[in-house]
Image (cartoon, rainbow, N blue to C red):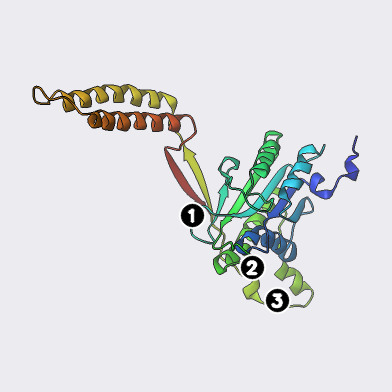
Amino acid sequence: MTNVSDLPDFCTKPVLVLGCGNRLFGDDGFGCEVAEYLQTHYRLPDDVYVMDVGTSARKLLFTLCLSPERPRQIILVDAVDKGRMPGEIFELSLDDLPVEKRSDFSLHQVPSSNLAKELKEAGVDVRVIVCQVGRVPESVEPGLSEPVAQAVPRVAAEIARRLSAVFQEPSVQAEDLLEAQGKHPDSSDLAGEEPTMVKEKKVYLPRWIAWMIAVIMLPVWGWLTYATFGGQAAGERPSLGEWAVISIVILGALVMVFLMSYGKLPAYIIREEDE
């Protein structure tokens, strides 16, 4: 049996912050930059461990799954492409993580998503904070785009604020530490607007509503059929196209309703800003 004292700090600290991504490919290095910013600009509570895991998120999550000791909370920071404005910051649920394959082993891959879900099922509070990328080049091209670079201090400030609230201990910004040493940092490097986190809440239809809609739509289908074909002039036969149009519309609507009720397709999405 592994002695808990022999485990690495990322297994034993109550809170683990992981910066994921690849600095060599533009905005994909966002998570790594946030981890570095937290390490260099903030003095965080002792119970917090910040790591720039780069493209090794999958290996580290796998280690945590096997570890006898795990953090109570894991905050994953990464960059994604969800078609939003570049530099926009928002949270994703584990079910909403992108599943497209990438050449690295960062959070974007399915295996890492599944490992994060396993940790959550084991009782770990897993949070995912992401930034909409502006550009991810096909070839090696380090450096963040301007809107994504501006999001780095904002996300770091948001994480520090959350940690301070949890541990009731202020997260001291590097500016204060440097001033105590008689140094004066460039304020433009540390200044950042107050972070605004955009949370999405997906709302699904209750199943009884889905069944009610289905019960209503079936007679509507019958009425449309009668209205279309019953009004035909004597001797005329309805075309297959008319049958197909009505059937496809009604059946398609029924399928959508049931997908909304079984958690596969949201009826609508509420977007909330958390100041």
Element under disc 1? loop
How many C-alpha atoms fall within 10 Å of the one at disc 2: few (<14), some, or many (≥20)? few
Q: Amino acid at mark 2?
A: Glu
Distance from the alpha carbon under mark 2 to that under mark 1? 21 Å
Q: Amino acid at mark 1?
A: Gly
Distance from the alpha carbon under mark 1 to that under mark 3? 36 Å
Residue sitting nearer the eye, 119 or 243: 243
- Of label 2 and label 1, which has the lower sequence position? 1
Query: Considering the image in quadrants, where does the C terminus appear?
Result: bottom right
Disc 3: which residue: 185
Residue sitting nearer the eye, 62 or 159: 62
The dot on residue 100 is none
Of the two numbered discs 3 and 2 in the rendering, the one whose residue sits closer to the viewer: 2
Element under disc 3? loop
Horizontal side of residue 62 vs 260, given as left or right: right
- Of label 3 and label 2, which has the lower sequence position? 2
Disc 2: which residue: 141
Task: Name the residue at 70% across, 64% down.
Answer: 37
Name the spot of residue 233 as percent of width and height, x first. Answer: 9, 25
Element under disc 2? loop
Task: Name the residue at 31% across, 33% down.
Answer: 249
Residue 173 appearing in the image: no
Task: Name the residue at 57% across, 57% down.
Answer: 131
Classify 21 as above or below 217: below
Name the spot of residue 137 as percent of width and height, x first. Answer: 59, 63
Residue 20 appearing in the image: yes
Task: Name the residue at 76% across, 69% down.
Answer: 177
The dot on residue 83 is 1
